[in-house]
Image (cartoon, rainbow, N blue to C red):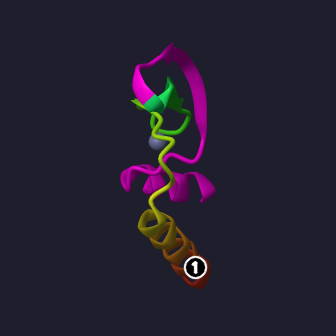
Amino acid sequence: MLEKLLIICCHFDYHPKTRLVDVKMGFGPSGKIEKVECQICKKVYIRDNKGINLKIVLIVILLFFLFMLLF
Ligand SMILES: [Zn+2]
């Protein structure tokens, strides 16, 4: 059940379980670039350290409560 919820998170481009794959030194103020792999959907992407999208977090929380009510 929790796995299904995490897949929904992935669908909204929010990956809760990630594993660090590669670290590269970038240019400018952004510093290092971290390449991470999602342990749930196996997607490899560049981690954005510019803060988590609050809207996505709210959607996920809302979905979680919806699940709690349904099951
Ligand atoms: Zn994912």
Farthest residue to the front: give it. Answer: 28
Q: Which residue corresponds to mark 1?
A: 65
Depth check: 65 or 35 in front?
Answer: 35
| Foreground pick, 24 / 40 | 24
Q: Residue at x 52, y 55 (%)?
A: 4
Q: Quadrant of residue 46?
A: top left
Which segment is the magenta one? 1-28
Residue 30 in percent (x, y) is at: 46, 32
Name the residue type under label 1. Answer: Phe
6 vs 11, left or right, is right
Crowding around mark 1 (Cα neighbors within 10 Å: few <14, some 14 to 19, many 20+) is few
The residue positioned 51% from the left and 42% from the top of the image is: 49
Q: Secondary structure at mark 1?
A: helix
Q: Quadrant of the N terminus?
A: bottom right
Q: Quadrant of residue 61?
A: bottom right
Say which of 22 and 13 sits in front.
Answer: 22
Q: Is residue 26 above or below residue 65?
A: above
State the image coordinates of residue 59 (x, y, percent, origin top left): 45, 71
Q: Which sits in the foreground, 50 or 22?
A: 50
Q: Is residue 35 above or below residue 50?
A: above
**In the displayed structure, would residue 71 be above or below residue 14?**
below
Tell me where residue 33 appears, x and y as whole percent.
48, 24
